[in-house]
Image (cartoon, helix red, strand yellow):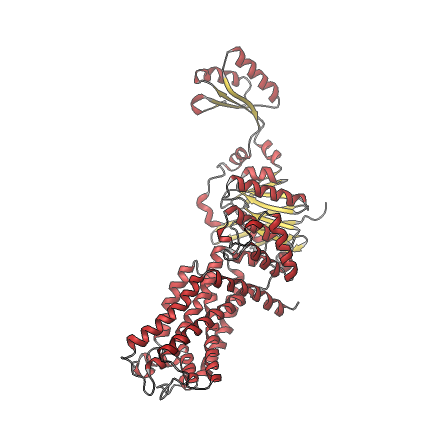
């Protein structure tokens, strides 16, 4: 296998008594998407800053497109397009002016910087407001502009730090479309996210981190498989049937049957024969005249994965945000 | 492209960006221009009668002092601008670009010279209305303005360094007020050196704000019978000012660039 486009080995970064990164390894092959998934304060942003020359790690090495980030920061910067967690655009400049400025600071020359700015505005659907100062933009528009800024020099490696945090669902969907398109064009991408769904949708490979270290690594499917197989979930019409339904589920369940919503919702983990288990349950329900609103076979979500890996769910850890 | 040319080019791009802000946020410009007018009028008419400046009308004598004070205050914009850039995250964008490390600072300190030019023009016009006159040659007067601008540029580097260290724009505005008020009031900007008591007098004499004020006052021909002090600094105010300018830039430009490199935003 050829040298990965992004590689980090044993990254360590300490702040006073806190280890923000405790020996993190990453590798992203060319044209692939790696999601760095973790709650706030897990060390995602620190990792991104180390990889993009903004922060010097205390230990470890990093390279981007074959360039040693620590030894040749300027050369490495030319290979990376970074879009941060907060849209880093000048609020008094228009979208067009922002992009031209960035192009000129990449030393594209005035003409090419202007042409490139126009191109990106069209591509990111920003031409409509391109002449207004960016402080009048919505959060989603600013994020798109920031991402456009990261792409001005058409870098081979794109790093996105929480690209959709704080966006409304529609803006998030738009951002996802843009990211997918970039990957389709062959970009190598590292993205951090605290949304498990986002990693699931966008990434080829997921590294789950917590407290600055990797706690799991694999594709979304592999990670889901780690938490066990599929589940049968049932929603009853009436709680009168709870006990009967629970007994029927218990015949096929691996472990305990979970009961929620005051007895209306039941769930049971099942083994490898999930389909025939489901059939047996349905036959049981028919036999005992259990009325249901919904019955289905579900795979665990990445949220379930996260919970089982870290022992806390993905929204906890807010208080350690400052450690980033 | 050589490193030097690149730094100048990058600096120019950043300066252009800062200058666009002058047009887009006229409130800033109003503030830059209104406060010096206010100072001219307050001092000219409130203290004008109470302060004795031998051989010259107080209002005429005062203007160089207002220039000096405003130039020093103007440097706050450099610090506030950088602090704001840090807060808003745009510094992250700059730092992720393969541009010269000093460009953001060179651009910022340079564009702030434009603010100072604008406020000097407004103050000079206000001064002319209240009785200020240029008594020496045109070139001397020009040299006086140039010296003020160069001094302001040097102070900008101090503020750039501070601006990159403080957590927010509010902090730098308050902090600089605490430093700049005594620095400009314990100088010969508003009150002649001879009128200070023996404890403050040496401070006034060696205060660089006194020197830049005295130098431009001389160059405009508004000094009257003399600086009222035998101190070398006030007898050779141009040389003494330039020594400070070189010293400040030599110390604070490298400090500011270093701070920019290591600054973790937010």
- The count of marks equals 0
- Left or right: A176 as drawn, with respect to B112: right
Q: From what the image shows, is residue A7 above or below residue B197?
A: above
Rendered location of residue B177, percent (x, y): 37, 67
Quadrant for the N terminus of chain A, please.
top right
Question: Residue A199: x and y, percent?
Answer: 58, 39
- What x and y, as percent, mark residue A211? 51, 45
Taking the image as shown, residue B1 lies to the left or right of residue A259, namely right
- Can the viewer see residue B243 in this picture? no
Residue at position x 51%, y 64% in the image = B19
Q: Nearer the viewer, residue A232 or B210?
A: B210
Q: Residue placed farthest to the right in the image?
A: A1
Q: Residue furthest front?
A: B129
What residue is rendered at 62% in x and 51% in y?
A120
- Above or below, A86 against B222 in this view is above
Residue A159 seen in this snapshot = yes
Q: Quadrant of residue A207?
A: top right
Q: Is residue A254 above or below residue B138?
A: above
Decide which of B117, B69 is in the foreground and name it. Answer: B117
Frontmost residue, B91 versus B243: B91
In the depicted view, which residue is nearer to us: B257 or A147? A147
- Specify whether A258 is left or right of B39: right
Residue B216: name its quadrant. bottom left
Q: Residue furthest top?
A: A287
Q: Residue at x 60, y 47 (%)?
A: A124
Most extreme residue toward the left is B50
Query: Does B124 appear above or below A130?
Result: below
Looking at the picture, how far across and down is residue A33, in whole percent?
63, 43
């Amino acid at each position: 296998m050829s040298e990965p486009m992004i590689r980090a080995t044993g990254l360590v970064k300490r702040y006073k008594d806190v280890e923000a990164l405790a020996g993190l390894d990453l590798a992203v092959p060319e044209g692939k998407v790696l999601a760095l998934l973790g709650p706030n304060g897990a060390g995602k942003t620190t990792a991104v800053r180390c990889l993009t020359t903004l922060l010097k790690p205390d230990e470890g090495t990093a390279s981007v497109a074959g360039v040693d980030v620590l030894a040749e920061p300027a050369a490495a910067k030319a290979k990376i397009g970074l879009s941060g967690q907060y849209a880093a655009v000048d609020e008094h400049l228009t979208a067009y002016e922002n992009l031209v400025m960035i192009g000129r600071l990449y030393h594209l020359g005035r003409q090419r910087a202007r042409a490139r700015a126009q191109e990106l505005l069209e591509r990111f659907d920003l031409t409509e407001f391109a002449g207004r100062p960016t402080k009048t933009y919505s959060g989603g528009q600013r994020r798109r502009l920031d991402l456009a800024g990261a792409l001005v020099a058409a870098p081979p490696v794109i790093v996105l730090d929480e690209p959709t945090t704080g966006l409304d669902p529609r803006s998030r969907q738009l951002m996802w479309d843009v990211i997918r398109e970039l990957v389709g064009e062959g970009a190598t991408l590292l993205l951090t996210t605290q949304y498990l769904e986002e990693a699931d949708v966008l990434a080829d490979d997921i590294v789950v981190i917590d407290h600055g270290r990797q706690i799991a690594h694999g594709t979304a499917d592999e990670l889901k498989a780690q938490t066990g197989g599929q589940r049968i979930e049932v929603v009853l019409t009436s709680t009168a049937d709870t006990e009967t339904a629970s007994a029927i589920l218990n015949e096929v369940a691996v472990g305990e049957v979970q009961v929620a919503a005051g007895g209306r919702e039941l769930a049971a983990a099942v083994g490898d024969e999930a389909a025939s288990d489901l059939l047996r349950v349905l036959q049981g329900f028919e036999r005992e005249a259990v009325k249901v609103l919904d019955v289905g076979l579900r795979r665990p979500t990445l949220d379930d994965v996260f919970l089982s890996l870290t022992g806390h769910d993905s929204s906890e850890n807010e208080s350690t945000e400052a450690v980033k | 492209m050589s490193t030097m040319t690149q730094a100048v080019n990058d600096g120019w791009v950043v300066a252009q960006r800062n200058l666009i802000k002058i047009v887009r946020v006229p409130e800033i410009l109003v503030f830059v221009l209104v406060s010096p007018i206010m100072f001219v009028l307050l001092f000219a008419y409130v203290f004008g009668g109470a302060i004795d400046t031998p051989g010259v009308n107080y209002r005429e004598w005062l203007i160089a002092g207002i220039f000096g004070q405003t130039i020093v205050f103007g440097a706050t914009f450099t610090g506030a601008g950088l602090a704001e850039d840090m807060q808003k995250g745009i510094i992250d964008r700059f730092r992720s670009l393969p541009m010269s490390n000093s460009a953001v600072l060179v651009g910022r300190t340079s564009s702030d010279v434009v603010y100072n030019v604008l406020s000097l023009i407004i103050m000079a016009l206000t001064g002319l209305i209240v009785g200020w006159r240029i008594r020496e040659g045109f070139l001397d007067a020009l040299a006086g303005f140039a010296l003020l601008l160069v001094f302001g540029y040097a102070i900008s580097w101090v503020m750039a360094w501070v601006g990159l260290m403080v957590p927010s724009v509010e902090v730098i505005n308050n902090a600089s007020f605490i430093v700049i008020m005594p620095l400009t009031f314990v100088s010969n900007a508003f009150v002649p050196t001879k009128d200070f008591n023996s404890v403050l007098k040496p401070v006034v004499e060696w205060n660089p704000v006194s020197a830049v004020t005295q130098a431009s006052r001389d160059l405009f021909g508004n000094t009257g019978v003399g600086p009222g002090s035998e101190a070398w600094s006030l007898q050779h105010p141009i040389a003494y000012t330039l020594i400070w300018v070189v010293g400040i830039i030599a110390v604070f430009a490298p400090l500011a660039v270093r701070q920019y490199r290591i600054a973790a935003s937010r």
